[in-house]
Amino acid sequence: MKIVVTGASGFVGRHVLAALRTYEVDIVAVTRDAAHLSGIDETVCIVEMDISNPPQNCFEHLGKPDVLIHLAWDGLPNYKSLHHFEIELPRQYQFLQSLVEDGLSSMLVTGTCFEYGMQSGALSEEMLPQPNNPYGYAKNALCQQLQYLKSNRPFNLAWARLFYMYGEGQAATSLYPKLKEAVLRGDKVFNMSGGEQLRDYLHITEIARQIVRLAVPQRDIGIINICSGNPISVRRLVEQWICDSNWDIKPNLGYYPYPDYEPMAFWGDRQRLNSISQY
């Protein structure tokens, strides 16, 4: 079996490549700059390619894969940029459509919890998406486009809605790297919001494991949350990280306002993920 991973040099991509190496599959890692994957396992085939300008016969160029794990998406972390639906959405659909038309039979595409919008509480896949920022809107629109494409050209689709994640290699603008950077600077306090918002956090290695577990069997799963299912306050999470690492720093609560693009309390419903037996 051959599996292609786009966005392979990104935060999620690198962990997905690591998770895939526990399976007996041929791995093709797609990146715009092969230098970003220097030092990767030599058994991984690296293809340098920009999905916004793919070569002709892209499916053949990628080795006619059995499965695509599609992680690539530009424009983050600016969730409010119009780039997401003006540029990124048509670019993404054209790339995926061309692969399906040329013979791709199975794909897993990562979505986002922002597709649910400002809905509070436990968010299940049966809930109607109500995105309230351009990023969530574009991701949900791509999901709908792929579902329409399936009606004309059947293929297996797993749409994996990711919630919050943390771990080594994450972008410097994220919560965990910011906390670690403050510790390394020798700061005695960590400036943050009030921290009372409830969120769903899962370590990146577990997220990558679940992505691979869902992709490898080549099943038509549809929309599925990848989440912990356990709400935790951001304040408690930061305190937990500090305690676990024995860092000498204290949260400075209320320094920043709460984000206006997400509700105060939401987390993922994990029942569907739990119901799918392990491959």
Image: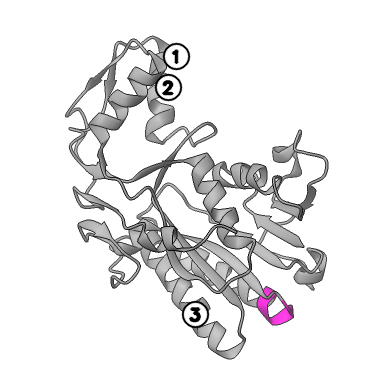
Numbered label attached to residue 184: 1
Give the tally of numbered discs: 3
What residue lies at 29% left-to-right and 21% top-to-bottom? 190
Colour treatment of the image: one colour
Compute the Cα span from label 3 to label 2: 41 Å
Region of the chain picked out in magenta, as a range: 99-103
Please say if 124 is above or below 198: below
**Residue 40 relative to residue 254: left or right:** right
For label 3, count other residues whose C-alpha is less than 10 Å away and answer few (under 14), some (14-19) or many (20+): some
Looking at the picture, which amino acid does disc 1 mark? Answer: Leu
Marks 3 and 2, the one that precedes in the sequence: 3
Q: Is residue 103 above or below residue 34?
A: below
Give residue 160's position: percent from left, percent from top: 47, 61
**Rendered location of residue 103, percent (x, y):** 73, 78
Does the rendering let one see residue 60? Answer: yes
Q: Which residue is mark 3?
A: 147
Q: Secondary structure at mark 2?
A: helix
Quadrant of the image occupied by residue 256 = top left
Q: Quick check: marks 2 and 1 in contact, CB under 8 Å?
A: yes
Contact between marks 3 and 1 (CB within 8 A): the answer is no
Q: Considering the numbered disc 1 on the image, is that residue within a helix, a strand or a loop? A: helix
Where disc 3 sits, the SS reads helix
- Residue 127 vs residue 185, the one in the foreground: 127
The label shown at residue 180 is: 2
Mark 2 residue type = Lys
Amino acid type for the residue under numbered disc 3: Gln
Q: Image point 50% across, 47% down: which residue?
A: 207
Q: Is residue 52 visible?
A: no
